[in-house]
Image: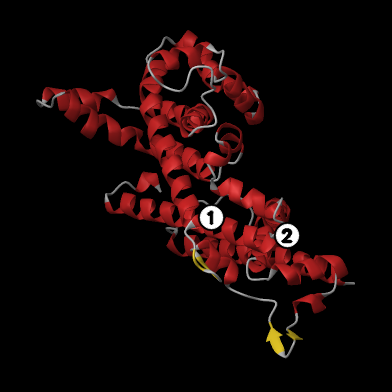
Amino acid sequence: MEGLIVIAGLITVVVLATVILSRHAQRGARAVERVRPRGEIEFGERLTARDHVIRSAITSGPGIAWVTFFLLIPLLVMGVMGFVTNNALKEYQATGSLEAFKAKEVKGVTTSAFTLDNYKRFFGYGRLGFNPLYPKILWRSFKLALGTTICCIICAFPLAFFIAAMPAKYKGLALTLAVIPFWTNLLIRTYAWQLLLAPDSLITKAMNLIGVGDPGSPLYPSAGAVFVGMVSAYLPFLILPLYTAVEKIDWSIAEAASDLGADGKRVFWYAVLPQVMPGLAAGITLVFIPAMGQYVVPDLLGGAKMDMLGNAIQRQFGASLNWPMGSAIAFLSMGAVMIALWIYARTAAKRGAEALL
């Protein structure tokens, strides 16, 4: 019975969302009608409010349902689960009854099934005092994601300009070579890096000659191995949008800046860089966000030396069986990333770079 109630509630949410969106579309159409000059020819049929709802349900309904079921509802469940005690959740999983979430009296003390302890632990404030474990993990993940993004920018810029300058018949081949890593699963590529960084590999021997690593030992697990694996995994995500932006550069602006006396650095900074900023911003977003929560690469190439947010979340949902704590970590991590992107968007808007938004 509870399952039917939940399903009915979800269907109601989808229908209401569809109706609200259709109402907004209808208001927008009326606003356009008010500002349309007289005598302008209007193409298409006029729809009633009921027709708007039906067409919106047909066209937008599947997308709204997908986002609702597989994004919004899981996020809502994850957010609520972060406020639940682990004991209450385990009792609910064992009995299937909502009675597990009611307050209980144990030895004369009333205990609630809801708590802020999971979120407090993330910020280091546990029952035994301050423990900076999770703040350190968050800071380590942020540094790794930021370093990966910066290194990808440094590598992607010359590659994007090089591909854009190639003859048209070779550009397709160059772009294919750039996206070839996508043809292989990330897990397999990470295992390949273990072979490349093994004790007997040419890379390891070459690094040993210049004093990096101990002879006869692999170059992993280490922070350097994780960094190399992350850059190789996410570099194509920055090359492609940056290449698209480079292809659209109006070189007459750069020529005009050069004719007006600007040197090479100023031409690039004031005439070329603003034109590729939309592609650069898209690439930064595509690299930074997934790098922040990466799990496979730090786990296989970093081991216990590189405990990241993804590893912490996996450990809570896996070995520790503490789903509320894992939900709190995931929810707060997502919030931290969204705040960083919001600050970036605000900064871009103040600089007049609305295209970055």
Disc 2 packing (10 Å; few <14; some 14–19; many ≥20): some
On the rendered structure, is 317 left or right of 233?
right
Can you identify the residue that label 2 sits on?
54
- Foreground: 30 or 204? 204
Label whose residue precedes the other's in the sequence (2 or 1): 2
Label 2, secondary structure: give it. helix
From this view, report whether residue 178 is shown above or below residue 5. above
Q: Which of marks 2 and 1 is in front?
A: 1
Q: Is residue 87 left or right of residue 145?
A: right
Residue 245 at x, y percent in the picture: 40, 30
Which label number is shown at residue 2? Answer: none
Identity of the residue drawn at 32% across and 52% down? 347
- Looking at the picture, which amino acid does disc 1 mark? Met
| Numbered marks: total | 2
Type of residue at label 2? Ile
Secondary structure, mark 1, is: helix
Crowdedness of circle 1 by 10 Å Cα count: few (<14), some, many (20+)?
Answer: some
Can residue 102 be seen here? The reply is yes
Spot occupied by residue 110 in the image (x, y as percentages of width and height): 70, 87
What residue is shown at x 50% (from left), y 56% (from top)?
A: 133
Quarter where residue 300 is shown: top right
The residue beneath circle 1 is 334
Residue 218: horizontal and vertical position, in percent? 54, 22
Residue drawn 48% across the image and 46% down it: 141
What colour-coding does the image apply? secondary structure
